[in-house]
Image (cartoon, rainbow, N blue to C red):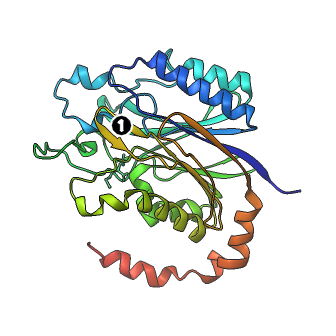
């Protein structure tokens, strides 16, 4: 008997700066319902799926900043999504921005949770690779201030047993780093869930703007193949508060092929039936990590590498 899992990439269009949590959570529930009608057992939402992607703006006032963050999960605003998951008997992965009090100090993270079909949190990941800057770039068409607003994630790269497999989460810029996928795959992850908010433009390197969509798929398709894993990449797309964000949400097989892809830049669901045994087959027959990797060779290099 194959291990089959139907997964939905639930892409979001833009979220307005002033859009209420009620409105956004309703959109997430509509997408969940569509996904369930298409047979999905797991629904994957984008990075920071409850708000506009505020790291694109310089925000000085702490109260203004706080309104983009969640203090607990599920909180009363987000509870209807958990209730819907319970009602529809479907699991979900949700990106959101989090305030945590640690040793009496207020910390901010760019986080994502995996929630079971009973509405229980299975696990949480906090983004490790934070792009951009901590300072303002007045000449840029928009800001990229993740280093100002977030701490580097302190939960490592966890993998959870669920859906008859092992699952890991990455968040946006993490997907550009081969190490992110590798540490999940080495722990046995066969399914990797990724949400992103990716501007079409990179003010630090405008000459690469025409390749933004290509690079998005390049990194995830290569990683799916090299790590023998299913990858679900989900965008918040479209023009959000003046910033054009790429779409291309997709479901990628361990062969590296895209098996389902969104065709719009708005709220849209695509579903694919993922054969988890295909991940196991690629791992056993093509790569055999335990037999063929050469960690002793890599270690010497990673200990000295600086750039
Ligand atoms: N949210 C996020 O991590 N965005 C970054 C933008 C970097 S510009 C290339 C990303 O890697 O998509």
- Horizontal and vertical percent position of residue 20: 41, 17
- Horizontal and vertical percent position of residue 220: 51, 60
- Horizontal and vertical percent position of residue 47: 45, 40
Q: Nearer the viewer, residue 263 or 98?
A: 263
Q: Quadrant of the C terminus?
A: bottom left
Quadrant in which residue 120 is drawn: top right
Residue occupying image coordinates x 30% and y 24%: 66
Q: Is residue 247 above or below residue 255?
A: above
Quadrant in which residue 36 is drawn: top right
| Residue 197 falls left or right of residue 228 | left
Residue 116 in view (yes/no): no
Residue occupying image coordinates x 42% and y 55%: 174
Q: Nearer the viewer, residue 49 or 159?
A: 49
| Residue 185 falls left or right of residue 22 | right
Q: Is mark 1 within 8 Å of ligand 1?
A: no
Q: Quadrant of the N terminus?
A: bottom right
- Horizontal and vertical percent position of residue 135: 14, 44
Residue occupying image coordinates x 49% and y 60%: 217
Q: Is residue 260 above or below residue 116?
A: below
What residue would you read off at disc 1? 239
Q: Residues within 10 Å of mark 1 (few under 14, many from 20)?
A: some
Q: Which element type, helix, strand or loop, lies under badge 1?
A: strand
Residue occupying image coordinates x 46% and y 46%: 247
Residue 199 in view (yes/no): yes
């Amino acid at each position: 008997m194959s291990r089959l899992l139907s997964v939905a990439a639930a892409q979001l269009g833009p979220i307005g700066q002033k859009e209420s949590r009620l409105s956004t959570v309703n959109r997430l529930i509509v997408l969940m319902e569509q996904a369930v009608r298409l047979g999905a057992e797991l629904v994957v939402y984008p990075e920071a799926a409850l708000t506009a992607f505020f790291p694109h703006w310089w925000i000085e006032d702490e109260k203004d900043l706080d309104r983009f963050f969640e203090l607990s999960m599920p909180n009363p605003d987000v509870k209807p999504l958990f209730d819907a998951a319970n009602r529809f008997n479907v699991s979900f992965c949700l990106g959101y921005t989090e305030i945590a009090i640690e040793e009496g100090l207020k910390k901010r993270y760019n986080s994502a949770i995996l929630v079971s079909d009973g509405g229980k949190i299975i696990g949480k990941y906090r983004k490790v690779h934070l792009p951009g800057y901590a300072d303002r770039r007045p000449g840029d068409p928009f800001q990229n201030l993740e280093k100002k607003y977030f701490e580097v994630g302190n939960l490592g790269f966890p993998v959870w047993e669920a859906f008859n497999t092992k699952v890991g989460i990455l968040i946006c810029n993490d997907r550009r780093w081969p190490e992110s996928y590798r540490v999940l795959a080495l722990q046995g992850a066969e399914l990797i869930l990724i949400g992103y908010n990716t501007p079409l433009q990179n003010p630090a390197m405008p000459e690469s703007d025409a390749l933004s969509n290509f690079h998005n798929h390049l990194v995830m398709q290569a990683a799916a193949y090299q790590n023998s894993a299913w990858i679900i990449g989900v965008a918040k797309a479209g023009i959000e508060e003046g910033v054009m964000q790429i779409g291309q949400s997709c479901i990628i097989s361990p062969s590296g092929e895209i098996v389902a892809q969104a065709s719009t830049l708005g709220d849209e669901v695509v579903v694919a039936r993922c054969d988890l045994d295909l991940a196991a087959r690629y791992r056993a027959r093509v790569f055999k990590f335990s037999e063929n990797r050469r960690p002793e060779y890599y270690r010497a290099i990673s200990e000295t590498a600086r750039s």
